[in-house]
Amino acid sequence: MSEARKATALLLPPLALLALFFAWPMALTLREALSSPDAWTWALGSPYVRSRLGTAVAQAALASGLALALALPLAWLHHRRALPFDRLQRALHAAPFVMPVFVMVLGIQAVLGRGGWVHDFTGVDALAALGPLGAVALTNAYYNYGFGARLLHAALLRRPHGLEESAQVLGAPPRLAFARVTLPLLAPSIAAVALLTFLFSMASFGVVLFLGEGEVGTPETLLYENLSGGFPRTDRAAVLGVLQLGLNLALLLGYLWLRRREARIPASSPRPAPPARPWESAAAWAITLLALAPLLAVLVGGFRLAGQWSLEPWRALLDASHPAHLGGFDLGRALFLSLLYAAATVILSLALTAMLAYGARRLGGWPRRAVEALAALPLGASSLLLGFGYLLAFGAGAWLDLRGGVLVVVLAHTLLAFPFAARILLPALDQHDRRLDEAAALLGARPREVALRIHAPLLRPHVLVAAGMAAAVSLGDFGASLVLTRPSTMGLGIWIARHGGLGSFDPLARAQSVALAGLLLVLVVGAYVLVERSRAPGEVVV
Amino acid sequence: MALRAPAAALLLLALALAGCTSAPEPAAAGTYAALGFDGTNWPRLEGVKLTVLAYSSFGSVFGDLARDFRNRTGAEVELVTEDDTGGVLERALREKGEPSFDVVYGVDNILLGKARREGLFEPYRALLARDIEPSLAFVEDGLATPMSHGYIAVNVDAKANLTLRTLDDVRANAGRFVTQDPRTSTPGLGFLIATVATYGDVSAGYDYLDYWKDLFEGGVLITAGWTEAYAGRFTGGYGQFESGARVDKAIVTSYTTSPAYEQYYGYDKLNHVVLAPKSTFHQVQTMAIAKGTPRLAAAQAFIEFCLTEAYQARAASGEAIYPVVRGVNVSDVYQGKDPRPGSFQTAGFTPAELDAKAEGWVRAWTEAYEKARAGA
């Protein structure tokens, strides 16, 4: 077989996997949706759906605005001054982006909610004052602002100082020079941050479910409403799923287009910024610590009960005979499963991406772009939608019944994580200097040796970043895990919810939830550190 | 790549685990009667691990029950809960054919028809079912075994100084009323059925949907489950003693035994129950065996065991409901403070009527609910 044929044959496994475990479930969802015209009338016409989607758009728009309002000054600060440990601080601000939903919700509640830090200090229940819409928008903004700051900061690194100076030489005042020269070039980045925050906020599930108090809805919470209880309406759920898929894909395409425009802007070498004055460094650190408060609250909360330090939550979690121990829960097993899912997701995602990358190398033009688009496609399907599709495709009565096992969870996580890995590794392999490969081939190396001996070491940082992101996606998954797992296959994420901590008033149950969330937080931070240590400065991960 | 080798081993392990469900057990696939159960002799079931799926408040009696069952038969039992009975049925439906549990407790006389149509259960005519009160033995083919019963009714906080006698009075105070979503909670469903019984099915005049429209306009709160409503929001429940509960509603849908239950646990006031004709609902909870369970004998043994005094006597103090077995005395718990069953008229639909119509009522309610929320 020719080299080209062999390489293209590599494309078959990933495409087959995408077809079977993404396209097929989505096709069945579409079929379910098309089977019921009533469900379409309801979804498109019902005032209830419209009002829920209205709140979804409202909170997403608010979140985007808020995220930009936080990200722009932060990026500007890091741009104008060389702060000590600035990479670390930017990484800390962006940490929420990879955090699981429970960590965020419990953290926000622990700081701003009833009985939280602000309440203890000032007697004000800030979360209630914000109202459900405000609380959801704030949490979604908090998720994305740090990532947005990083994207904007990276864009500012490419600021064309030379062009600005030319403008100033021609008589423009510095502000005008900036506004007329650089700002238009920054526009795609600003729009990208807004659009990505909007996309993730519209797709938000856990945050809205637990902080929305039923007042705020998104397509995904509506989907869940129609799936839960004794009288589920799968036809309505399917219609909502299809609509959500369409919406997400449209927003995603917009985001990808903006990022491509951004990439076309010629890079200029960054100028070193003047060192920060002491009060500026202190202020920057104060802001960073403030931003980390919810995460710190979660870490600490697992050891506090009724205002005192206590190990009781951990005792209840670990001791099966403890009266407050939740039936069916085994910490060792839950932890093992979470790590197993993460490890399996990492391996499968990396393998898929590698096959896709090497298989597509020989292709040019539109087949190449098609492959890249396919790799990004699963980003449009939210976790719950994928889980729902799997229930249809691999559930009761299907030709392949995967219920009750770990495989279906691994597959769902892999489908959700692999687009992130692809978006990191595909460009990295593209940018690799082929002359090295050619030189090696001249010296007698076969393609596989080239891959192992040249690509692997050079791409190792990117592989680690991709691995870290895949692990974070798997550890933080909620929607798919909610519908696809049963007590014997549930990971930490779902057990946090089942401990009733999010709605519960029983302090010990809640403390157990927070303790588990703290544990999950530590695991995700581990994955995140891997990402951050390996990432090149200025490189953005989505 | 350095990461792959150890992780690949882990993946193989994962796929291997995917096939396993549990460690090999002694054969318990035959019936319990075949092993020698005759009502007095309880054959041992060493090494068997049974899983029971139930609603969360069952946990309060489960610890002692499991211990006693283990002493009697040697089998271990583990409890897995969902928040409310709707969640129990949801899980059973989702795992149809491949259940993660052996016994399910929480499908009642309203939902049993659906469970029957979906083929979720394995019938079993329990030997000790002969001790069940005949009027409660509504399942002829033994698809499920009645295990407890109660009367769903509106409870009013004694501290609130409200005299509510009928559902009309409840409507007048809708803003202080919290009830449960009938899709996810059977007390909520029971209350919905009571409104159908009181105001009539859809008609040109004032029907139950008009009643609900008025309730929504009046500001009634709907929660997903009973615990959130009764303990989280009701000012007269045990939640009032918990620091984290946001108790702010004086009227709640619960059981006729809830006020007496609160007194038994030390509350000094007796809440009031609305007992107007047809404003209450008689709910019979059943226990059933999951279809396809490999631990049939143990599942049957557990059902038989729950029909003995061991569970029936504790049902009252543990869960604020009534036992189904004749002759079990609950007066020491309720002290005569519960409205005597039979002294008030319940909604009165037969299981066949409920099975035929409940889903339609729930759908109509959902439409009314969504319409009201859309206006908000």
Image (tube, coloured by chain):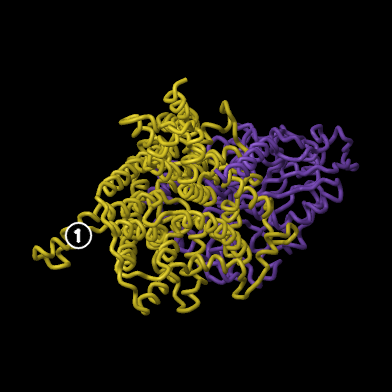
Q: Position of residue A400 (x, y in %)?
A: 58, 28
x and y percentages locating residue A540 in the rendered image: 38, 52
Left-right relation of A331 to A213: right
Residue projecting furthest to the left:
A171
Residue A389, relative to residue A172: is it above or below? above
Q: Name the residue at 34% across, 74% down.
A: A276
- Chain of the residue where label 1 is placed in the rendered structure: A
Does residue B294 sit above or below B343 in this rendering?
above
Question: Which residue extends farthest right?
Answer: B41
Decide if residue B168 is in sight here: no
Q: Horizontal placement of B214 versus B77: left or right?
A: left
Q: Amino acid at mark 1?
A: Gly
Question: Pointer 1: what residue?
Answer: A162
Left or right: A148 as drawn, with respect to A179: right
The quadrant in which residue A511 appears is bottom right
SS at mark 1?
helix
Q: Quadrant of the C terminus of chain B?
A: bottom left
Q: What shade has chain A been given?
A: yellow
Query: Which residue appears at 57% of the width and 26% of the height?
Result: A399
Instruction: Give the image location of residue B28, x and y in percent.
Output: 81, 36
Dot 1 alpha-carbon crowd within 10 angstroms: few under 14, some 14 to 19, many 20 or more? few
In-front residue for pair B269/B346: B269
Say which residue appears at 48% left-offset and 74% top-offset. Answer: A119
The picture's colour for chain B is purple
Q: Is residue A380 visible?
A: yes
- Along the line of sight, which residue is nearer the eye, A165 or A315? A165
State which quarter of the image contains the N terminus of chain B: top right
Q: Position of residue B12 (x, y in %)?
A: 64, 38
View extreme (top): residue: A1
